[in-house]
Amino acid sequence: MPCVKQSDFQEVYDVIFDGSTDWQELEVNLDQNYQWDNTSTYIKESPFFENLQAVPNRYKTSKMQGCYFILVIRLQRIISHLQGHSKKKLRLGNTSATSGK
């Protein structure tokens, strides 16, 4: 039964990252970001990344901040109002269920 020698293993795996000649002849762009080919019909850049900023500029003006604040306050009031009604209905439902009606 043949056994694997260290030299056999090294001979194969020392060149494993070299690849074939076809692999070595591939042109590679070493940029950090992928360079999209605008003429490609196979793969295109997603429109979600167009004009993407590192830090989103959500609140450009104090007017926008004020509008956002008012919206949040109103939504909180609506939610608490709805929660109050649902609690009352639950209490009524529980009492009628326990009284046998």
Image (tube, rainbow, N blue to C red):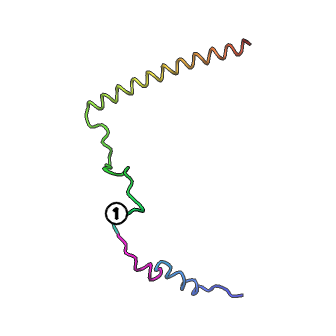
Q: Which residue is mark 1?
A: 39
Q: Is residue 40 above or below residue 67?
A: below
Asked whether 28 falls inside the magenta stretch, the response is: yes
Quadrant of res 97: top right
- Check the picture and name the quadrant holding the C terminus: top right
- Check the picture and name the quadrant holding the N terminus: bottom right
Please state the horizontal and vertical placement of residue 27, each as a whole percent of the image. Answer: 37, 75
**Mostly what secondary structure, the magenta segment?**
loop
- Residue for point 53% across, 80% down: 13
Q: Is residue 35 above or below residue 1?
A: above
Which class describes the residues within 10 Å of circle 1: few (<14), some (14-19), or many (20+)?
few
> What is the three-letter code of the residue carrying label 1?
Thr
Q: Residue furthest front?
A: 41
89 or 44: nearer the viewer: 44
99 vs 83, left or right, is right
Q: Residue furthest right?
A: 100
Please state the horizontal and vertical placement of residue 43, each as a whole percent of the image. Answer: 41, 61
Secondary element at tag 1? loop
Please state the horizontal and vertical placement of residue 93, each as a whole percent of the image. Answer: 65, 16
39 vs 13, left or right, is left
- Residue for point 52% across, 21% down: 83
Please state the horizontal and vertical placement of residue 32, each as a whole percent of the image. Answer: 35, 64
Quadrant of res 6: bottom right
Q: Is residue 74 above or below residue 28?
A: above
Asked whether 27 falls inside the magenta stretch, the response is: yes
How many numbered markers are drawn? 1
- Residue for point 57% across, 15% down: 88
Residue range highlighted in magenta: 19-29
- Residue for point 40% across, 76% down: 26
